[in-house]
Amino acid sequence: MTVGTDDQTGEPTFLGRATFHLTADGRKAFTVRYEGAGATEERWWQILASLDAAGLTSS
């Protein structure tokens, strides 16, 4: 996660990125990215929790 300020607008910014790896049962790797001035850390954790509830795990 990265929290900062947009250089052009001065607005707070958020960038969250999680990478999921190939598991023994054959699930493929992919990356989840969530960013923007309206993005929040709270929402980021909600997104990751919803993926975990679907049987995925993050690293």
Image (cartoon, rainbow, N blue to C red):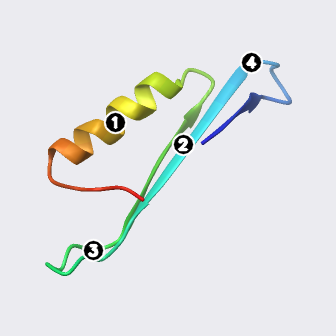
Q: CA distance from mark 2 to mark 4?
A: 17 Å
Confirm or deny contact between disc 1 and disc 2 (CB under 8 A): yes
Which of discs 4 and 1 lies nearer the camera? The answer is 1
- The residue under label 4 is which amino acid type? Glu
Quarter of the image with the N terminus is: top right
First along the sequence among labels 2 and 3: 2
First along the sequence among labels 1 and 3: 3
- Left or right? Give the position of 44 relative to 21: right
Image label count: 4
Which of discs 2 and 4 lies nearer the camera? The answer is 2
Which residue is depicted at the point 28% across and 37% down? 49
Quadrant assignment, res 27: bottom left
Which residue is depicted at the point 60% across and 31% down? 36
- Left or right? Give the position of 14 relative to 50: right
- The residue under label 3 is which amino acid type? Lys
Which residue is depicted at the point 78% across and 28% down? 6
- The residue under label 1 is which amino acid type? Ile
The residue tagged 4 is: 11
The residue tagged 2 is: 16
The residue tagged 1 is: 47
10 Å neighbourhood of mark 4: few (<14), some, or many (≥20)?
few
10 Å neighbourhood of mark 2: few (<14), some, or many (≥20)?
some
- The residue under label 2 is which amino acid type? Gly
First along the sequence among labels 4 and 3: 4
In what element is the residue under mark 2? strand
Q: CA distance from mark 2 to mark 3?
A: 20 Å
Confirm or deny contact between disc 1 and disc 3 (CB under 8 A): no
Which residue is depicted at the point 40% across and 33% down? 45
- Left or right? Give the position of 51 relative to 48: left
Q: CA distance from mark 4 to mark 1?
A: 22 Å
The residue tagged 3 is: 28
